[in-house]
């Protein structure tokens, strides 16, 4: 199970908030999704529309634990 669109929206907001606080985007983005019980797994299927050919989206490979 992957994060819902609403959970991703909130994760992006958390990421942008950490930029405002002087940290990196991924600090807030990853902390938010982790707090919801998701984890990033390298063995999870890619969800990018191009299969990750041009890099992965921030939400790629996040799954419920």
Image: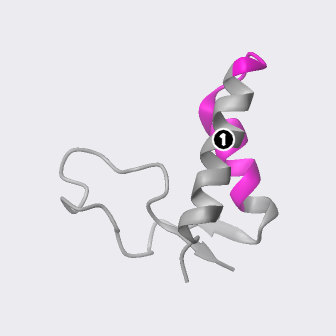
Where, quadrant-wise, is the N terminus in this rendering? bottom right
- Quarter of the view holding residue 54: top left
Residue range corresponding to the magenta coloring: 20-33
Question: In the picture, which quadrant includes the C terminus?
Answer: bottom right
| Element marked by disc 1 | helix
Above or below 55: residue 62: below
Provide residue 8's location: percent of width, then percent of height. 58, 58
Q: Quadrant of residue 40?
A: bottom right
Query: How many other residues sit within 10 Å of disc 1, few (<14), some (14-19) or many (≥20)?
Result: some
In the visual, does 50 lie left or right of 6? left
Residue 24 lies in magenta, yes or no?
Answer: yes
Q: Which residue is at a point 74% across and 16% down the rendered structure image? A: 22
Is residue 60 placed above or below 30 in the rendered structure? Answer: below
Image: 24 above or below 50: above
Q: Is residue 45 above or below residue 50?
A: below
Look at mark 1 in the image and give the residue it sits on.
Answer: 13
Q: Position of residue 25 (x, y in %)?
A: 61, 32
């Amino acid at each position: 199970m992957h994060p819902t669109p609403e959970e991703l929206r909130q994760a992006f907001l958390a990421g942008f908030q950490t930029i405002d606080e002087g940290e990196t985007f991924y600090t807030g983005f990853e902390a938010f999704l982790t707090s919801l019980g998701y984890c990033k797994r390298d063995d999870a299927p890619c969800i990018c529309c191009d299969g990750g050919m041009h890099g992965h989206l921030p939400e790629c490979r996040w799954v419920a634990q």
